[in-house]
Image (cartoon, rainbow, N blue to C red):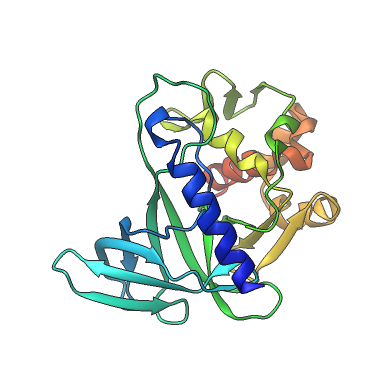
Amino acid sequence: MKKILIILDLFLFVIVTSWLPLRMSAQVAGMAASMPVDGYVILSNGDTLKGKIKWSLKYVENNPIEIKFTAENGYTKTFNASEIPGFGNYNYVKMTKESFDAPFEPELENYESMKSFKKGVPVFLNRLLDGRIKVFQNRSSVGLGGDKEVTISKYDGIKFSFSSGEGLMVGPSYRTDYRVIKGRTRYLSYFVTKDNGALLKIEKDNFDNMFSILFGDCPAIQQELGKNPDLQNFKNFTLLAEVYNQLCKVQ
């Protein structure tokens, strides 16, 4: 199984990097940095070091468990998920043929060390959303074309607004681009923690049962649902989680 995952990651890297001159627009999240790319590591004492990141292509439950880090001074060290709280690397992969004239800007992916969902082994999970509700990518559940499930293009909430043109806006200053919101809907399931608690797996089949655990403690969210009941659908999970993190910061 490990050999298959390594071959798959290398195949995707070769195919996608051959498209880079076309400056394509939507990145494939969680793809292995099999060549050194800019990034950082967070040490156990909380210090952050910048340098180059390269995945070792070792996996548990399809999640990386080891990276090779080269500091700006040339010092090189291999870290596994039991040694450091996390790391980040820039993803230069652009997959779709939209917005050919858009600026080519790599996006930083942030990974946290967590115990894997099934085996409880330390792995690095790609964090899609930070806050009281942390949402992590399930690399085994990418749904091809899953973002097409987004059928509502506009929400006028009480304390937030969302549209395909403006993206998400909460209050006077918080904003997330629509393309970021749309990209998070590609997944058929997610790994989630609430207030740094146990790792949960959220998917369409269990979403209704998990809903009150995730959102039931915030009156502001209940008011938003009263105005826009469709927000309670699984397709809007990451959107609602992001709104929750902004409106419900105090436990």
* Residue 33 falls left or right of residue 190: left
* 37 or 119: nearer the viewer: 37
Residue furthest out toward the left = 73
Is 123 above or below relative to 14?
below
Q: Where is residue 56 shown, x and y percent of the image?
A: 44, 71
* 82 or 18: nearer the viewer: 18
Q: Where is residue 100 shown, x and y percent of the image?
A: 44, 21
Residue 38 visible in image: yes
* 53 or 161: nearer the viewer: 53
The residue positioned 13% from the left and 68% from the top of the image is 73
Q: Where is residue 101 shown, x and y percent of the image?
A: 39, 19
The residue positioned 24% from the left and 61% from the top of the image is 50
Residue 227, quarter of the rendered image: top right
What is the tally of numbered marks visible in this picture?
A: 0
* 37 or 1: nearer the viewer: 1
* Residue 154 falls left or right of residue 38: right
The residue positioned 44% from the left and 40% from the top of the image is 18
Residue 4, quarter of the rendered image: bottom right
Is 239 above or below relative to 5?
above
The residue positioned 70% from the left and 54% from the top of the image is 141
- The quadrant the C terminus occupies is bottom right
Residue 251 visible in image: no
- The quadrant the N terminus occupies is bottom right
Residue 102, quarter of the rendered image: top left
